[in-house]
Amino acid sequence: MVNCTIENKVAIVQLNNGKVNAISHALIKELKENFIALEKNNEVDGVILTGHTGAFSAGLDVLEQAEMDEASAEAFWVDYFDALKAMVHYPKPFVCAITGFAPAGGTILTLCADYRIMAQEPKHRIGMHEFKLSMQVPELMLDIWCYTLGEQRAFQALQNATLFSAEEALALNIVQEIAPEHEVLERAKAHMEKCLKVYAPVYIESKRLARKQLLALVDRDNEQLAKAFVAFGKDPELKKRIQLFAQQLKSKQ
């Protein structure tokens, strides 16, 4: 689900779950474990998170979500929130190479990085479009989205289920650089080299000081956040909508 390779003391963490890199429980658990391990690995000086050609991640695995009972749903969300915490807390340089579309849950993964480079292709989009299906966004995900865009602009985008092109995302500072799809990973490596030229203790302390608000957002009781979100999801109408969407996805397979 997640491949991790080391190149010149930089970890390349690649999402690898089928054509669209759907965020399944197995994937998010592996992602969390990788970042926890990498923080402790003194042989690694930085991390690049990426997908594969044409896709970063299409967001949550809706088919899996539709089949979860309460206990498995809570376990999933605890691991998802813990993964966000592990990524935000990663102290060394962390660059995200957004190799393709990255809506919803995929968007939030990218926002944990220090610097984001997005593929400049017409079909690639980033943003939170859950309102298109009247789906609730978990509190922590929405907090990170609002931290990035500001509350008013973030909620306006949510209301309109806006998915931004690479050019639009760059203008809004959702991403910091755009490039042709085939250049994204190399540009991420180039930016990483720039970051690694900074004396490591200076980079780490400056990152901590600059991201105090984001760090505070992820330092929460993730079990309580998961329980609250799953409890909200018991609404019969919400469950029906998710089941219907899952059926539509199945019919396209």
Image (spheres, grey):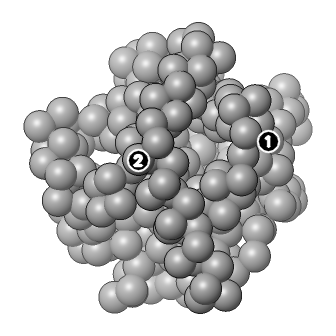
Tell me the residue at 44%/57% (across/down): 241
Tell me the residue at 58%/13% (across/down): 224
Which amino acid type corresponds to the residue marked 2 in the rendered image? Glu
Which quadrant, please, contains the C terminus?
bottom right
Q: Is residue 151 visible?
A: yes
Label 2, on which residue? Answer: 237
Please state the horizontal and vertical placement of residue 203, each as a whole percent of the image: 54, 29
Earlier along the polypeptide chain: callout 1 or callout 2?
1
Please state the horizontal and vertical placement of residue 149, each as a whole percent of the image: 23, 42
**Marks 1 and 2, how far apart at CA:** 29 Å
Q: Tell me the element at label 1.
A: helix
Tag of residue 29: 1
Which amino acid type corresponds to the residue marked 1 in the rendered image? Lys
Please state the horizontal and vertical placement of residue 213, each as a whole percent of the image: 37, 18
Tell me the residue at 21%/44% (across/down): 154
Snapshot quadrant of residue 16: bottom right
Tag of residue 120: none
Q: Are marks 1 and 2 in contact (CB under 8 Å)?
A: no
